[in-house]
């Protein structure tokens, strides 16, 4: 009788665990929610079946989804911008994702509404690149990279593109202009 109860309890526990869906807003290496780096752009329609997909650069005669797409919730809230490796190929994998919705967050809680202070507290900065209007921050051991507008930087760092910006020079309260995920293209 004890064996039957034990087996029943273990079976119920396994059944409950298998029924749990993955977090649709969790960002981890190689995945964001139900998307992963192996997904082809033509599969987006089925992954985001409950959401609205806006094709940005798709060919008007395309039978399948191709090119850049934006994903919106049915209520109209913009979630993601997905960019494939090859915009003309529906079998191309996604290589860049711009995250708009703050519900998408990393295992350490970093999201599009975070500040640079959250980055410094939880991540090691791999590299900082300076562009005309922003600095791009690459985080070590993660697919996430961030852009901070130069308007958030001290005055002496805003106008010189040749000046290398260091993490210590970026204010803690600097918000992200772009919260991005980058994946290397998959081999065909």
Image (cartoon, grey):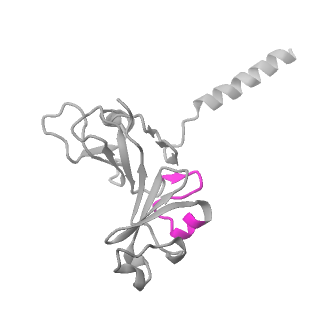
Q: Position of residue 162 (x, y in %)?
A: 36, 74
Q: Give the quadrant of residue 2.
A: top right
Q: Residue furthest front?
A: 162
- 106 left or right, relative to 52: right
Q: Give the quadrant of residue 20.
A: top right
Q: Is residue 182 above or below residue 135?
A: above
In which quadrant will I find the C terminus? Answer: top left
Q: Residue at x 38, y 49 (%)?
A: 97
169 or 73: nearer the viewer? 169
Q: Residue at x 38, y 32 (%)?
A: 187
Q: Position of residue 74 (x, y in %)?
A: 34, 47
- 173 left or right, relative to 90: right
Residue 148 included in the magenta stretch of the image = no
Q: Is residue 181 above or below residue 33?
A: below
Q: Residue furthest bottom?
A: 155
Total marks placed: 0
Range of magenta residues: 104-120
- 43 left or right, relative to 27: left
Q: Residue at x 86, y 14 (%)?
A: 1
81 or 145: nearer the viewer? 145
Q: Residue at x 52, y 69 (%)?
A: 116
- 77 left or right, relative to 123: left
Q: Residue furthest left?
A: 61
Q: Is residue 176 above or below residue 40?
A: below
Q: Position of residue 142 (x, y in %)?
A: 52, 50
């Amino acid at each position: 009788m004890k064996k039957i109860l034990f087996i029943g309890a273990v079976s119920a526990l396994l059944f409950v665990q298998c029924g749990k869906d993955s977090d649709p807003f969790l960002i981890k290496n190689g995945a964001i929610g139900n998307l992963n780096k192996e997904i082809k752009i033509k599969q987006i329609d089925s992954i985001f079946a409950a959401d609205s997909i806006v094709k940005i650069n798709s060919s008007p005669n395309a039978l399948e989804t191709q090119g850049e797409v934006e994903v919106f919730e049915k209520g109209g809230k913009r979630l993601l911008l997905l960019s494939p490796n090859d915009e003309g190929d529906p079998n191309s994998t996604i290589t860049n994702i711009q995250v708009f919705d703050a519900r998408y967050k990393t295992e350490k809680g970093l999201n599009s509404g975070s500040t640079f202070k959250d980055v410094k507290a939880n991540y090691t900065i791999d590299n900082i690149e300076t562009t005309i209007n922003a600095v791009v921050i690459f985080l070590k051991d993660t697919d996430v990279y961030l852009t901070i507008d130069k308007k958030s930087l001290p005055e002496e760092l805003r106008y010189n593109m040749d000046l290398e910006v260091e993490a210590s020079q970026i204010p803690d309260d600097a918000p992200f202009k772009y919260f991005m995920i980058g994946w290397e293209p998959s081999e065909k």
